[in-house]
Amino acid sequence: MIPHFRTGTGFDVHRLVPGRELWLCGLKLPHTHGLLGHSDADVAIHSLCDALLGAAALRDIGYHFPDTDPAYSGADSKILLARVVELLADKGYAIGNVDITIMAEAPKINPHIPAMQQLLAAIMKITPDAVSIKATTTETLGFTGRREGIASLASALIYKP
């Protein structure tokens, strides 16, 4: 039998502010600013959750984990991702691969990518080589270029074995 494949995309943006920790792909990175949000504001995991949820037609991260719910205040986005993986499994889906692009002028993301791949793969129960993470700048253009925020775009392939 041919597996049933589906794809999804996700996009998220958070503002950089002083006095917050910077979390990206589940890792705390050293930086002068952190991302502002109701949870830990891990923009990369949020875009990944939306890509996975979208592929399964399960709406979006705000539907499942609303910022109006105090239960998610300061929430660890790794826990949100684990819950999304459970939601997919409940519908009979497995994750094939994911691809994340993080748009930021600073800090440097590339040195952290292997650890990010390992961490996200463990949560999603896939191999690290099925987790692509890329970092780019916007060549000082726009809000990311002015270091006002970080954006992330993700895509995901899911399937029913």
Image (cartoon, rainbow, N blue to C red):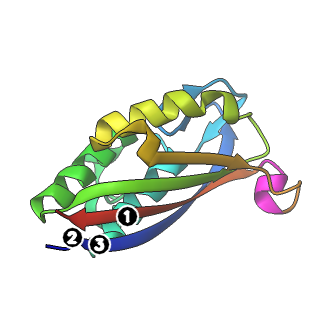
Mark number, residue 5: 3
Q: Nearer the viewer, mark 2 or mark 3?
A: 2
Q: Residue furthest right?
A: 140
Q: Residue at x 74, y 34 (%)?
A: 108
Provide residue 24's location: percent of width, then percent of height: 54, 39
Marks 3,1: beta carbons within 8 A: yes
- The N terminus is located in which quarter? bottom left
Marks 2,1: beta carbons within 8 A: no
**Which is the main secondary structure of the residues drawn in magenta?**
helix
Residue type at mark 1 is Leu
- Corner quadrant of residue 153: bottom right
Q: Disc 1 marks which residue? A: 157
Provide residue 85's location: percent of width, then percent of height: 24, 51
Helix, strand or loop at disc 1? strand
Crowding at mark 3 (Cα within 10 Å: few <14, some 14-19, many 20+): some
Marks 2,3: beta carbons within 8 A: yes
Whether residue 57 sits left or right of residue 99 in the image: it is: left
* CA distance for labels 3 and 1: 7 Å
In the rendered structure, which disc, 3 or 1, sits on the residue that comes first in sequence? 3
Q: Residue at x 58, y 34 (%)?
A: 113
Provide residue 6's location: percent of width, then percent of height: 32, 73
* CA distance for labels 2 and 3: 6 Å
Crowding at mark 2 (Cα within 10 Å: few <14, some 14-19, many 20+): few
Which stretch did the figure color magenta?
Answer: 142-147
Mark number, residue 3: 2
68 or 44, nearer to the observer? 44
Q: Residue at x 52, y 49 (%)?
A: 44
* CA distance for labels 2 and 1: 12 Å
